[in-house]
Image: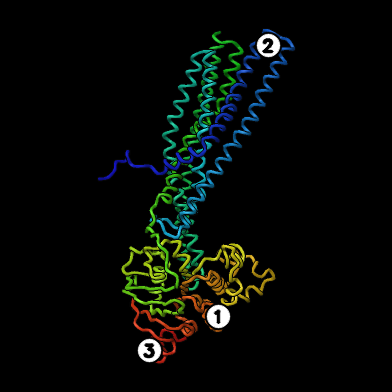
């Protein structure tokens, strides 16, 4: 039975409550200071009215001095309370936004994927814009309360002059908020949809950047750009819709506030004309009608920001409350480095079975590239163990029983499209900064020419995604990073497809030498790497159909010869 909507838990609301609870101290301090600011602002026209009232009766220099001193105190209070109140609230806001950014980023970077239908670009948008807008609730609540203080002080002051003026402010404020509360719901829904469309456009950009070179290679760039144009146009149209709704909201709020201020001023003028209030009270009422515009404007904008914060919190909840696709076990692999794949069925794999013993260098020649990609995904635990048939064992233990941290420490799968990060050659090769095996990895991957080409050497600056490197240089940099990690079991997926034959031959020889005594599995069709391996497994139609050395397979297997000969 489905849970009724009224009883369904609201993860977005829980996020907002957490943000508010964590910043109670800052919000109380900010509310007090901003309340003092609004009270002092409202006190200014009240003081002017009193000054006019009493100055007309007592025209002495002492009264003038007291009046000037009172106004100076009020102005000083306004200035200092605003300055320090906003400082407290904005610091809390920024800190809270940072906390949520870190949490969302941590979920996106977890080694075990979460069951959420979002791309990396969408998660990036959630971790930035949505985190900021959610944290705005910390400022919204104190500003809402302080605006209420200003309206209350004004209503009380006007009621002391004439009850009808105070009631007019109270009734008008309630009417304005009622109208704007209905409009703010539309803003929240529109903003949530805008954020989703912007996130999809960001994800599309990320995909295009990653695949730009291959797209140019087969002429698919125009179709891809057309696809992005459609997504981007949708985001633009929604942004215009949101801007239009916000404009209508702001215009309506301003108009209603102006109508209330005019109503208060006209009513006060009529009461003064009738002799029911004094000139000083008239000055106070007109002044309050002008000053009350600011807190009313702020007060009327708060529902909009609450709905925006709520919409952003709901989007963050998509990531934060998503369950991992698998639950890792508590065990660790036995030392040694053996890798076993037993009757695995996933994608194009149809019961693949093989074993790589500890310290062995094995190559797999896959006749169908998709099969190599499916095998790499299974070994990298990008596919949950329960999502495929068969068993993968690392160090004698089933991968489903191992903690993901121990798998990552023991087994490293380096994809053919490994990411290159903005930084330097050194930080890309050794992200953790341990400094181990960097030189050996650079030499083995034949990255020495890139290092020698720049006087900064390993400290040469790399742009995001390696934009200032060629395809072959990026691939060798990724390989150097994998080798420098010195994992007990290393799986390389097509590590030399972008390098020339001579460099490929040298890399194959160097990798075999560097990894001697360590377990290494290479998924490749490179003759150089196949020849450097202790043995070659042939993967065809999802199963291992042959096993021998590269040279023996070349001599006795015509299909193998056609598949790998260049």
Q: Is residue 198 above or below residue 140?
A: below
Residue occupying image coordinates x 74% and y 12%: 61
Left or right of 467 on screen, residue 229: left
Q: Quadrant of residue 327?
A: bottom left
Q: Secondary structure at mark 2?
A: helix
Residue occupying image coordinates x 46% and y 28%: 176
User: Badge 1 local density, few (<14 within 10 Å), some, or many (20+)?
Assistant: some
Q: Quadrant of residue 382?
A: bottom left
Mark number displayed over residue 557: 3
**x, y percent for residue 226:** 46, 62
Q: Secondary structure at mark 3?
A: loop
Mark number displayed over residue 510: 1
Which residue is outermost to the left?
Answer: 1
Residue occupying image coordinates x 49% and y 21%: 169
Q: Is residue 157 above or below residue 29?
A: above
**x, y percent for residue 123:** 47, 54
Kindly report the distance in space between the C-alpha atoms of the residues bearing marks 3 and 1.
27 Å
Kindly report the distance in space between the C-alpha atoms of the residues bearing marks 2 and 1.
96 Å
Kindly report the distance in space between the C-alpha atoms of the residues bearing marks 3 and 2.
112 Å
- Choose mark 3 or mark 2, whichever is in front: 3
User: Badge 2 local density, few (<14 within 10 Å), some, or many (20+)?
Assistant: some
- Choose mark 2 or mark 1, whichever is in front: 1
Q: Is residue 506 above or below residue 172?
A: below
Mark number displayed over residue 55: 2
């Amino acid at each position: 039975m489905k849970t009724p909507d009224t009883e369904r838990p609201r993860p977005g609301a829980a996020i907002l409550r957490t943000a508010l609870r964590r910043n109670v101290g800052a919000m109380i301090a900010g509310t007090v200071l901003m309340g003092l600011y609004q009270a002092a602002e409202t006190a200014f026209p009240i003081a002017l009215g009193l000054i006019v009232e009493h100055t007309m009766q007592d025209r002495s220099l002492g009264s003038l001095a007291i009046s000037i001193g009172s106004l100076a105190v009020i102005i000083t209070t306004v200035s200092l309370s605003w300055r320090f109140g906003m400082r407290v609230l904005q610091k809390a806001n920024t800190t809270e936004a940072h906390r949520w950014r870190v949490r969302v980023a941590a979920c996106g970077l977890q080694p075990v994927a979460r069951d959420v239908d979002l791309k990396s670009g969408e998660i990036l948008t959630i971790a930035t814009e949505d985190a900021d807008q959610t944290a705005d609730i910390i400022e919204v609540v104190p500003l809402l309360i302080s605006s209420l203080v200003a309206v209350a002080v004004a209503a009380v002051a006007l009621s002391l002059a004439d009850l009808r003026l105070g009631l007019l402010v109270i009734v008008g404020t309630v009417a304005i908020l009622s109208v704007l509360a209905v409009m703010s719901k539309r803003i929240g829904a529109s903003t949530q949809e805008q954020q989703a469309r912007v996130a999809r456009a960001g994800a599309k950009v990320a995909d295009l950047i990653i695949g730009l070179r291959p797209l140019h290679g087969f002429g698919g760039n125009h179709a891809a750009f057309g696809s992005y144009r459609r997504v981007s146009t949708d985001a633009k149209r929604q942004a215009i819709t949101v801007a239009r709704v916000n404009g209508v909201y702001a215009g309506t709020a301003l108009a209603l506030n102006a109508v209330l201020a005019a109503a208060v001023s006209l009513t006060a003028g009529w009461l003064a004309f009738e002799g029911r209030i004094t000139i000083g009270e008239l000055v106070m009422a007109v002044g309050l009608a002008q000053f009350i515009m600011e807190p009313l404007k702020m007060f009327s904008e708060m529902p909009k920001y609450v709905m925006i914060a709520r919409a952003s919190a709901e989007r963050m909840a998509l990531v934060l409350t998503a369950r991992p696709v698998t639950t890792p076990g508590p065990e660790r692999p036995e030392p040694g480095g053996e890798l076993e794949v037993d009757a695995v069925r996933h994608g194009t794999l149809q019961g693949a079975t093989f074993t790589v013993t500890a310290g062995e260098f094995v190559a797999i020649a896959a006749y169908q590239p998709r099969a190599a990609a499916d095998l790499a995904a299974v070994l990298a635990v990008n596919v949950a163990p329960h999502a495929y048939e068969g068993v993968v064992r690392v160090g004698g233990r089933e991968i489903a029983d191992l903690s993901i941290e121990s798998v990552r420490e023991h087994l490293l799968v380096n994809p053919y499209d490994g990411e290159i990060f903005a930084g330097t050659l050194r930080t890309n090769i050794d992200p953790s900064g341990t400094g181990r095996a960097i030189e050996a990895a650079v030499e083995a991957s034949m990255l020495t020419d890139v290092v020698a080409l720049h006087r900064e050497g390993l400290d040469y600056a790399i742009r995001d995604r390696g934009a200032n490197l060629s395809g072959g240089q990026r691939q060798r940099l990724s390989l150097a990073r994998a080798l420098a990690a010195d994992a007990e079991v290393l799986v390389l997926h097509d590590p030399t497809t972008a390098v020339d034959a001579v460099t490929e031959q040298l890399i194959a020889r160097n990798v075999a030498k560097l990894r001697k005594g360590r377990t290494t599995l290479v998924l490749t069709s490179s003759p150089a790497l196949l020849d450097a391996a202790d043995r070659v497994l042939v993967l065809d139609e999802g199963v291992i159909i042959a096993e021998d050395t590269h040279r023996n397979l070349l001599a006795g297997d015509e299909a193998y010869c056609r598949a790998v000969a260049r």
